[in-house]
Image (spheres, rainbow, N blue to C red):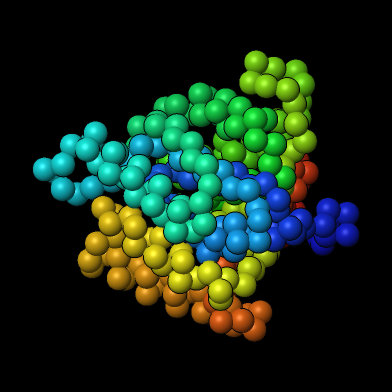
Amino acid sequence: MDLTAILPIPDLMAAKKLVVFSPHPDDNEVGAGATIARLIAQGCDVTYVIATSGQAGSEDPAISGEQLAAVRKEEQVMALEILGGGRIIFLDYPDTQLQEHAAELGRDVIRVIREVRPDFVMSPDPWLPYEAHPDHTTLGHQVSTGVIMAPFALAQPDLGPPVPSPSIAYYGSAWPNTVVDVTSTFEAKLRALDAHKSQFGPPLGPQLMMYLTLLAQEIGREIGVERAEPFKVLTPHHLHFNAYTWQA
């Protein structure tokens, strides 16, 4: 069923104030870095919210979790500067353990939405088939819930006054409905990813850069541009009691 006449898909590139929720330092750059850079370049105010410290993201037993978390914070700051700059909120939940902190995380999501008052939020798509990382699915679900709860005056009143629900754009989605031309900002995405040196050294780094480049080129051909990024963009009304949202 085509519901776009009743629930038109919002224009992501018209966003004026965006909050981008990331499970770990680097996920925003992987999923949406070039689009974020384009939005910043056209004047969008961007706030990053990094849910976990990323302290578990290494196969090197010689580095401590505290050391890695400090490195990854520095890398995230550098990456966002490369994309154009913005505010970063580090929630510092333990990496790989967001499920155990879901209720507290959900409160943080609502608090940030009510404080910043964005017209758009962004997160990983929690309904991505075969997504095995619980931090990604947990954060995506909590952000989705926060979107629909933000305007309810009697829901979590201690987290700030109610605000209009923002639209949401999921990256890493199996059912994208929006494709953004990022030809002019894709190289910034690659430079931002390169700032995450603790995560993307060889051989993974070069392999990831190649994969993301080929993917952007393939998606770009669909709309006749050199490179593009895909998103599932929805209104708050798509997120509750709507059996056809996956088709939207």
What percent of the width, then of the height, locates residue 137?
49, 43
Q: Residue at x 41, y 67 (%)?
A: 190
Residue farthest toward the left in the current orientation of the protein: 62
- Considering every residue shown, the one lying at the far right of the view is 5
Q: Quadrant of residue 40?
A: bottom right
Q: Position of residue 107 (x, y in %)?
A: 57, 25
Q: Nearer the viewer, residue 29 or 177?
A: 29
Residue 181, x across and y down, in percent = 62, 72
For this rendering, which residue is in front, 74 or 98?
74
**How many discs appear?**
0
Q: Is residue 6 left or right of residue 36?
A: right
- Residue 175 seen by the camera: no
Where 62 sits versus 175, above or below? above
Give the percent coordinates (x, y) of residue 26.
40, 52
The answer to whether residue 196 is above or below residue 64 is: below
Q: Is residue 80 above or below residue 117?
A: below
Left or right of 97 in this view: 158: right
**Res. 34 in view:** yes
Q: What is the quadrant of the C terminus in the image? A: bottom right
Above or below 87: residue 110 = above
Determine which quarter of the picture holds residue 223.
bottom right
Q: Residue at x 52, y 42 (%)?
A: 87
- The residue lying toward the viewer, choosing from 209 and 171, is 209
Question: Split into 4 quadrants, where in the image is the N terminus?
Answer: bottom right
The residue that appears at 51% across and 51% down in the rendered structure is 85
| Residue name at image x 48 percent, y 41 percent | 88
